[in-house]
Image: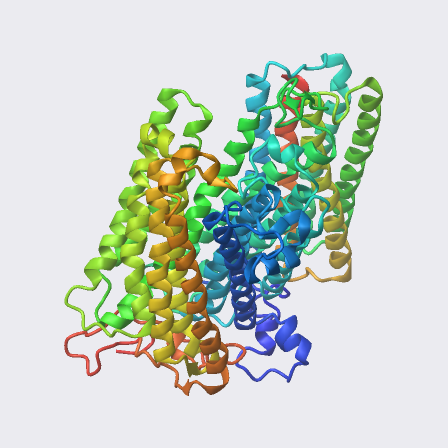
Amino acid sequence: MTDSHGHGGGHGHGHGAPQSFWRAYIFSVDHKVIGIQYLITSLLFLLIGFLMAVLIRYQLSTPAPGDDFNPENLGLIRGMLAGIFGENNMPYGFMAPEFYNQLGAMHGTIMIFLGVVPLGVAAFGNYVLPLQIGADDMAFPRLNMMSYWVYFVGGIVMLASFMAPGGAAQSGWTSYAPLSVAAPAGQTWWLIGMVIIITSSLFGAINFVVTTLNLRAKGMTLGRMPVFVWAQLVTAVLLLIAFPVLEAGALLQLLDRVAGTSFYIPKDMMYGGAVFPAAGGGNPLLWQHLFWFLAHPEVYVLLLPAMGIVAEIIATNTRKPLFGYKELVGSMILIGALSFVVWAHHMFVSGMRTSLANLFVTTTLTISVPSVAILTCLLLSLRGGQIRYNTPMLFALAFLPMFGIGGLTGLPLGFAPTDLYLHDTYYVIGHFHYVVAPGSLVALMGATYYWFPKMFGRRMNETLGKVHFWATVIPMNFIFFPMLIQGMWGMQRRLADPTLQWHNMDVQGWSTVILWGAAVMMLGQIPFLFNFFWSIWNGEKVGENPWDATTLEWACPSPPPHGNFAAPPEVFRGPYEYSVPGHPSDYWPQDEAA
Amino acid sequence: MSTAHAHAPANTSTGISHAKLGTWSFLASEIMLFGGLISAYVILRSGSSHMAIPPREMMGVPLATINTFVLITSSVTMVLALVGIQRGNIQQFARFMSCTIGGGFIFLLIKAYEYNHKWHEGITLSSNLFGSFYYTLTGLHVLHVTGGIVLLFMILFAGLRGDYTKNHERVECAGLYWHFVDLVWVILFPILYLL
């Protein structure tokens, strides 16, 4: 006990002895430093994953040499690509299918496990959650530090896998067996990297659950916790009990690859014209079940923190209480529970008894009810508000219709009959990107602008922020909406060269639109990167509470010292008491005594 | 502050200490880890037409029964050790902790003998699906027992040093883990040896 919270006493109120550079910034146990470490690392991974996507889109816009192709004069871009990635990966600047598969698999893996989840859960969760509940740190500060460094190592293993013989994993982020079992060495690296990342995630989840339940300030009852804290709590529980199942699955796949077991290898499986050397008797479907048992809750791990963020930003910038706090929280809990019984809707095309498919269609359509409830609450929260259109609010507002498109395009995939047609097409890519990119990621960008003043004591530049907003949200729709069209036309995903299929030629032109969208969006991130680093040192200085918000993170200095609050805060009311009649100001902080 | 945390009930919002809540959360994830593997085994065992089950004689049921008995006994001695430290009786604590650790070692020794025997009988990790599951499930469990023994050693030494005279929370949490490891074996034993 004394150790698990041991450092709290020494530096409880920010009078700790000066620490060395290494203890203060690199191997820090302060939740705020760890949060910023996660923030910067995950933004870096998002950038890497995004550049991979741009490469993929470049390939898909002109997948094969045309009539005017001249091997002597490749032009600037193709010449550079051929030079950088080599003759094996990009001969003449066109992508070899194996390399395309590697980029596809690693783009998904990096974006989900190293980018969006660490940003939404670990970065903002770590930084904001203890502040919002009035705690001086996480429950297990050293475990928190380990969680970051284990994640870091996992990320390095993933990136290093490109150096493995045969390149990185190329079986998709889903790593379906038995192809993944027979794939080159990169897949083993992927599995080891995944086990490391899962370990980090479990450390984090335990920490978040215990912190949220145990370290609330006096008066901070469960019913007074901000929606963001609730979102993090549900997310942590999902990570805690869904991720170990993937760990089990990954362990079995690892043994299949290195120890000659056959958990996923059927009897007498033919591979490459010969019987695969394994005893057999296993079942590839087993992997899909174990994988999706994690990976559907994972979708909500990507989404719930974003919803919590949007709720915070909307409440602050409409100057009125959230519509339906209890419904929001209840829906989040319901989503968390239901997310464990919908996984097989990813497997309709794998062959399934109709009765079983019906069950999963039903659960899938049921889970859309709380999702719509959340969206409705957030939308109704706008009604009658005095909306301040600052950068975080723009991102939060954009989240609503963007996530709406993502959610609604999911319905045809939840119905087994329509899913059979759409499942292997670009429609699925369009759908889940709408949920994760213009959905979650947009909310996370808003969160960066919203909590930046707390983290660095300075505001990010508004003009650059608005340029970033429009240059992100508009191009995003030119990237992902055409995918829905291509998919309904029947263009299959996972192809390095879709023009090999004649029927795709009718919609191939959209790939040029997508490439331009991606290029503009890439340029649109430059103002953000500049703004972020410039504002750390040169932004407009702000005080404790630049947005006039009510929740506890705004009741301590910006940035908060080690130990956060000068005195343990006490909470007197719910989280969103804005424009309370009779109160002198239009916001009534949670810790202000009546 | 560190002493303020030491007294029960813990000075937290729930009244449950961080360590205990953390241990239970950890065990929840452990249940899902073993749960995933055990379900995979149960599903393929009932669904695969190529999972040959070795005859019971080859499995060595008597030894495994002794092992079950050893592990359950070690759980009982773990409880007695906790009672000892709660009463401030370091001697009782040390005696029963040693018994628990000893139980863990006996379990591992018998397991090593079993592995060696089965491997020579032709049941290996890659021989067939049953062998794969047998070594994976029991192997992961053996890793947990080994980790548990290391943990219990640390608890024993810290206890002898006098760390737990006031706060015996850590002994309790180590006990929770040890009971969990025991429970996993109680499930593995029937589904691998008896059914």
Residue placed most toward the observer, A200 or A171: A171
Using the image, determine if residue A245 lies above or below residue A549. Answer: above
Residue placed most toward the observer, B31 or A36: A36
Query: Residue B38's spot in the image, x, y percent?
Result: 59, 30
Which residue occupies 22% across, 53% down? A376
Please tell me in which quadrant of the rendered image residue B191 appears.
Answer: top right
Image quadrant occupied by the C terminus of chain A: bottom left
Query: Residue A399's spot in the image, x, y percent?
Result: 32, 59
Q: How is the image coloured?
A: rainbow
Residue placed most toward the observer, A283 or A585: A283
Q: Is residue A12 visible?
A: yes
Which residue occupies 80% across, 22% down? B118
Q: Is residue A338 visible?
A: no
- Number of marks: 0
A54 sits to left or right of B150 = left
Image quadrant occupied by the N terminus of chain A: bottom right
A184 sits to left or right of A546 = right
Using the image, determine if residue A441 lies above or below residue A296. Answer: below
Residue placed most toward the observer, B137 or A339: A339
Query: Residue A453's spot in the image, x, y percent?
Result: 42, 79
Query: Residue A290's spot in the image, x, y percent?
Result: 53, 35
Which residue occupies 75% across, 21% down? B127
